[in-house]
Amino acid sequence: MEKQKKYDSHKHPAARGERTEREHPRDRKPRPASENISEDSESGAVIGRNAVRELLKTDRSVDKLLVQRGERTGSIVVLVAQAIEKGIPVIETDKNKLDALAGFAPHQGVIAFASEKEYCTVSDILRIAEERGEAPLLVVCDGITDPYNLGAIIRCAECCGAHGVIIPKRRAVGVTPLVTKASAGAIEHMAVAKVPNIAAAVEELKENGVWTFAAEAGGEDLYQTNFRGPCALILGSEGNGVSQLVKKTCDTVVSIPMYGSVNSFNVSAAAAILLSQIAHQHHAD
């Protein structure tokens, strides 16, 4: 299964964040200048203590930290101290304001607003692997629409040492605050490429010596498959799985053995199983 490696010389760009949803009309009332927040809740927000903690570990520019008004306890005290040390404005606000900005996802009393996350290219991801001296490991998401699933997949990818995640520009979720929240901060350490065509991206990977595996029923047994060397795992959408065109483009199809009555795993659960086995083989030596 050995293929010749090719790598682009592009550098991995610095990460930035996404914007968030418009302020709810019920919150449009006079406020002190320090609370005059008008961010859009679809991009820019990093939600929850884990995600904010990972954000503060990076060099990404943070505009402000919003914390729930009242007594501060637990890890939020540490986060506020770190923000102050970095010179990041810390603003107290009401719980209902944080709820609205978070899209009513659990925010644990803290939301950060960072600069926009910059998507990279497929070549950038291959360059990251080369700089680490490792065989490339990529995760390709073919039409994932649930932000919680995409966030969980990014978390699995980061935990298993993947070098990047590829998502499509259309008919799929991008890196939103809910994705950031679901990734538990892993998004801050993961390169994400947003491409116009997944099948073309798979072809590009193959041209660069990467073996491509579509996760679908009826394929090779996961535990009998050789994943050593450069490889990419392609995961399909929640409803339809990997598209026929993309599946035909891949080198092979791989499947998780099933022993129960239900015929498939949730896509993020499948990602955890598949990536754990791939990572085990990549690091077996």
Image (cartoon, rainbow, N blue to C red):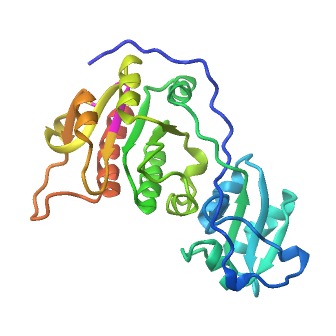
- The answer to whether residue 268 shows anywhere in this view is yes
Query: In the image, residue 258 lies at what x, y percent?
Result: 13, 54
Q: Quadrant of residue 267?
A: bottom left
Residue depicted at x 64% and y 63%: 20
Residue 96 counted in the magenta span: no
Count of numbered circles in the view: 0
As rendered, which of 243 and 161 lies closer to the eye? 243
- The answer to whether residue 284 shows anywhere in this view is no
Q: Is residue 3 above or below residue 31?
A: above
Query: In the image, residue 27 lies at what x, y percent?
Result: 72, 83
As rendered, which of 152 and 250 lies closer to the eye? 250
Q: Is residue 144 above or below residue 129?
A: below
Furthest residue in direction front, as rendered: 25
Q: Is residue 15 above or below residue 23?
A: above
Query: In the image, residue 248 lies at what x, y percent?
Result: 22, 30
Query: In the image, residue 7 lies at what x, y percent?
Result: 51, 17
The quarter of the picture where the N terminus appears is top left
Furthest residue in direction right, as rendered: 33
Residue depicted at x 42% and y 35%: 138
Would residue 155 appear left or right of 39 to someone viewing this image? left
Q: Which residues, given as a range, are shown in magenta? A: 227-233
Residue depicted at x 46% and y 41%: 165
Residue depicted at x 63% and y 68%: 49
Q: Quadrant of residue 21?
A: bottom right
The quarter of the picture where the C terminus appears is top left
Would residue 90 appear left or right of 197 to someone viewing this image? right
Q: Quadrant of residue 262?
A: bottom left
Would residue 175 appear left or right of 266 to someone viewing this image? right
